[in-house]
Image (cartoon, rainbow, N blue to C red):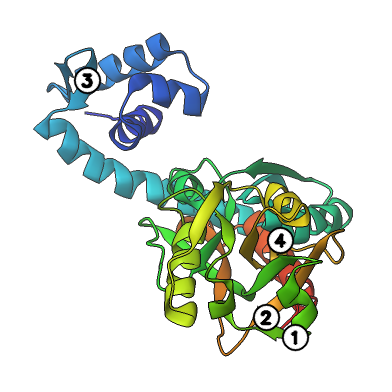
Amino acid sequence: MMLDLRRLRLLRELHERGTIAAVGEALQFTPSAVSQQLAVLEREAGVPLLERVGRGVRLTDAGLVLVEHADALLDRAAAAEADLAAASGEVAGRGRIATFQSAALRIVLPTMESLARTAPRLRCELVEDEPEHSLPALALGDYDLVLGDEWQHHPRALPRGVERHDLLRDPVRIVLPVRHALARRYDDAVPLAELADAYWAAGHEEMGWDEMTRRTCREHGGFDPDIRHRTNDAILTLALVARGLTVALLPGLVLPERHPGVTVRAIAGATVEREIFAATRSVDAARPSTAALLAAVREHATSASSGLAR
């Protein structure tokens, strides 16, 4: 029996992504082409690998056994490709970076700009994506490097086969309307308890920013914040603050050097921050393109960190 690695990858993708349609979308195949290739794999294996469940399919016990072997085989094949790339020494191919907005603006864009000069044969691609989705997608090979964030008391679990590279600590600040009474009263740090009656902006419920805002207000201010506005867009949050409609806790990386109508203060008596990190696949460690991406990201993260207010 000879099993085709490309078809084994389809089986693994189906196990991870759940539907044939999702596999086809990720790998740019039609669903019918995916189904046909999986049918060929079943004939090669000589046992049923899939069974129908409602309008979808799931792996049989034999299919699950084969997926375990497929993981090992595909990882070895990827490691072999990385070693061959390392032997050539050329920084080329695809460098697909997934990141969230503030890291894209302050770290990834300068990274891509410098790599366009130093590694012109590396095709850099940017995708805005939150770590909740981008880290699992990295493990599947959809991305080559991911930038993620981790709030205090809210650690992120990494998928199997993914390595983390810490980049910088991003301090959280109080963002106030420039005419707010506390902005005039305190030049440096504001006691959080004095904002107990304020209207707050935060991220969507169960996201890291929302949890951080609630926890910080409770631990360092002794109150539950009245969150009136929810968005994952820092630009919209700053606009709300500038109009005097809200206050917020925001990390330094999202704060522009100047924003009309907004002033920034430290949290009196508290250090609150998030970790910014890069993530790559373990099997890509020897790949020159991955090494070039990671080195450039580290360089520009250091530059971004030096500009953050402490």
Indicate which disc, 4 or 2, sits on the residue closer to the N terminus: 4
User: Which residue was labeled with disc 4?
Assistant: 254
Mark 2 vs mark 3: give the one in front: 2
Structural distance between the alpha carbons of marks 4 and 3: 43 Å
User: Which residue was labeled with disc 1?
Assistant: 188
Q: In this orientation, which residue lies closer to the viewer: 250 or 128?
A: 250
Q: Residue placed at 46% from the left, 13% from the top? A: 30
**Amino acid beneath label 2:** Ala
Q: What x and y, as percent, mark residue 204?
A: 49, 48
Q: What x and y, as percent, mark residue 58?
A: 20, 26
Indicate which disc, 2 or 1, sits on the residue closer to the N terminus: 1
User: Which residue was labeled with disc 3?
Assistant: 57
Q: The N terminus lies in which quarter of the figure?
A: top left
| 40 is higher (above) or lower (below) than 60 | above
Q: The C terminus lies in which quarter of the figure?
A: bottom right
User: Which residue was labeled with disc 2?
Assistant: 266
Q: Residue placed at 27% from the left, 29% from the top? A: 2
Q: In the figure, is residue 180 to the left or right of 216?
A: right
Structural distance between the alpha carbons of marks 2 and 3: 53 Å
**Amino acid beneath label 4:** Val
Indicate which disc, 3 or 1, sits on the residue closer to the N terminus: 3
Picture quadrant of residue 177: bottom right
**Amino acid beneath label 3:** Val
Q: What x and y, as percent, mark residue 197?
A: 54, 66
Label 2 crowding class (10 Å Cα cut-off): few <14, some 14-19, many 20+? many
**Amino acid beneath label 1:** Asp
Indicate which disc, 4 or 3, sits on the residue closer to the N terminus: 3
Structural distance between the alpha carbons of marks 2 and 1: 6 Å
Q: In this orientation, which residue lies closer to the viewer: 202 or 276?
A: 202
Mark 4 vs mark 3: give the one in front: 4
